């Protein structure tokens, strides 16, 4: 998906919501366990209920790989279902890959050829040759981890060199030598608050994938205030607060309602941006 199409979808839907499909077999409603493929049955219902209100889906690979072959099949079926029924949705494989060049080439082939997702999250720690193999696919995106929302992010990401440059800032600056804003996005956690202001000084035009609103306590208003660009520039993810809004038979209905609430908030932020 091109950047233009992504922006067009955001403006048309008045939403920059990404629904995280962090589907845990231990948390889905009990009645679904009687299904042949409970994970896919859950995902399909969530997707049908939330698709009008979001512009992206982000399945986290850990939740599928934990189930072995059955989980991977459910993941593949989920991708195919979105592609077939909601082709305007931006699909992110939250895989956090990143290895030496030859291995990264195979990861890229997996996600961009075999599965045909739009983007994959990639860890930058091993440097340029671990990231650039993902860049050889037209219309596909690398979403590089920059400043994450977890408590341990300060262990490395906020450490400074002798010139006072923090590691996440070095990642942002150096990676711009590898790709431009038509191929690369960055993960920045919603809980980082005012840091978005500093990040926008380094990457003023790149899209940011922002996890951490909802269950993790990040503020959508604050993210938009400091991180939004004239083209929005944000894909804001919510997982648990939407997909686990209910564990009863009304789980999909409630998920749709929660997604709609977030979409309405986002529509107001887009309106403010365009004034």
Image: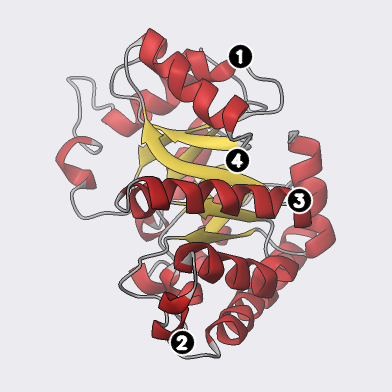
Regarding residue 86, the answer to whether it shows in the image is no
Say which of 271 and 147 sits in front.
Answer: 147
Q: Calculate the distance from the C-alpha at mark 2 to the C-alpha at mark 4.
A: 31 Å
Q: Secondary structure at mark 1?
A: loop
| Of callouts 2 and 3, the N-terminal one | 3
| Of callouts 2 and 1, the N-terminal one | 1
Nearer the camera: disc 2 or disc 1:
2
Nearer the camera: disc 3 or disc 1:
3
| Of callouts 4 and 1, the N-terminal one | 1
Q: Residues within 10 Å of mark 3 (few under 14, many from 20)?
A: few
Residue 207 image label: 4
Position of the C terminus, as image quadrant, is bottom right
Query: Which residue is under mark 2?
Result: 246
Q: Secondary structure at mark 2?
A: loop
Residue in the image at 84% along x and 59% along y: 12
Q: Secondary structure at mark 3?
A: helix
Marks 4/1 in contact by CB < 8 Å: the verdict is no
Query: Which residue is under mark 3?
Result: 84
- Where is residue 147? Give x, y as percent: 35, 42
Q: Calculate the distance from the C-alpha at mark 4 to the C-alpha at mark 3.
A: 25 Å
Query: Which residue is under mark 1?
Result: 136
- Where is residue 27? Give x, y as percent: 34, 75
Say which of 72 and 202 sits in front.
Answer: 72
Residue in the image at 37% along x and 73% along y: 215
| Of callouts 2 and 4, the N-terminal one | 4
Residue in the image at 26% along x and 54% along y: 150
């Amino acid at each position: 998906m091109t950047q233009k199409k992504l922006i067009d979808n955001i403006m048309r839907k008045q939403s920059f919501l990404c629904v995280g499909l962090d589907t845990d077999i231990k948390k889905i409603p009990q009645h679904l366990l009687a299904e042949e493929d409970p994970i896919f049955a859950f995902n399909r219902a969530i997707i049908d209920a939330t698709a009008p209100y979001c512009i992206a889906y982000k399945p986290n690979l850990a939740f599928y790989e934990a189930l072995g072959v059955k989980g991977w099949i459910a993941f593949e079926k989920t991708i195919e279902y979105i592609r077939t029924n909601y082709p305007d949705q931006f699909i992110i494989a939250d895989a956090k890959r990143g290895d030496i060049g030859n291995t990264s080439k195979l990861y890229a082939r997996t996600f961009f050829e075999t599965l045909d997702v739009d983007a994959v999250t990639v860890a930058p720690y091993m440097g340029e040759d671990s990231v650039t193999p993902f860049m050889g696919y037209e219309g596909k995106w690398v979403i590089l981890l920059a400043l994450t929302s977890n408590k341990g992010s300060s262990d490395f990401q906020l450490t400074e060199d002798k010139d006072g440059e923090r590691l996440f800032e070095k990642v942002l600056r150096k990676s711009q030598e590898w790709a431009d804003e038509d191929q690369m996005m960055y993960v920045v956690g919603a809980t980082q608050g005012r840091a978005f202001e500093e990040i926008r000084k380094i990457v003023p035009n790149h899209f940011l994938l922002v996890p951490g609103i909802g269950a993790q306590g990040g503020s959508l208003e604050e993210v938009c205030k400091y991180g939004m660009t004239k083209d929005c520039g944000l894909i804001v993810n919510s997982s648990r607060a939407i997909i686990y809004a209910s564990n009863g038979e009304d789980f999909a209905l409630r998920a749709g309602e929660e997604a709609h609430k977030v979409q309405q908030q986002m529509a107001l932020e887009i309106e403010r941006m365009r004034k």
